[in-house]
Amino acid sequence: MLLLKVKDKEYTLRLTARHLRDLEYREKKSILSMFNKLEEISLIEPFIKIIHAALIKNHPELKLDDVYDLYDDLVEYENYNTDKLQKLVEDIMSTAGLTMGAE
């Protein structure tokens, strides 16, 4: 489980198997192929969708549009950039038992 602090609020992130399945079903592709799209800097959508899926378990009230606002707050108030966001998504995936790259 990861904690994400934005302004004065903390969010718990945990990508569960159920939410991972739901995300892959909606996107009609594996999360690993979504993650590979993160290499393309212009695509923010995969970041947002993966973060949203990780928030659902502990913050079911947050909708996808709320996570776009959360992203804006991360950039504005927590000095996040694409490197920090990519690290966050990597950490989310790691805590879900998913690894990037070959061993």
Image: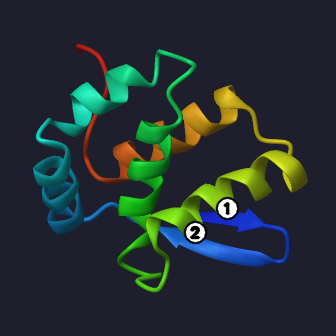
SS at mark 2 in the image: helix
x then y, percent, for residue 42: 56, 21
Q: Nearer the viewer, residue 4 or 33?
A: 33
Q: Amino acid at mark 2?
A: Asp
Q: Nearer the viewer, residue 73 or 92?
A: 73
How many numbered dots are placed on residues in this image? 2
Verify CB contact (< 8 Å) between mark 1 and mark 2: yes
How much space separates mark 1 and mark 2, taking CA atoms?
Answer: 5 Å
Q: Quarter holding the C terminus?
A: top left
SS at mark 1 in the image: helix
Question: Which residue lies under the disc numbered 1?
Answer: 69
x then y, percent, for residue 53: 35, 61
Position of residue 62 in the picture relative to residue 76 (left or right): left
Question: What colour scheme has been applied to the protein in the rendered image?
Answer: rainbow
Q: Nearer the viewer, residue 78 or 99?
A: 78
Question: Which residue lies under the disc numbered 2?
Answer: 66
Rendered view: 27 above or below 19: above
> Residue 30 is drawn in which quadrant?
top left
Name the residue rendered at 35%, 78% in the picture: 57
Rendered view: 19 above or below 84: below
Name the residue rendered at 25%, 47% in the picture: 97
Rendered view: 22 above or below 50: below
Other-residue count near label 2 (Cα within 10 Å), few / some / many at <14 / 14–19 / ≥20: few
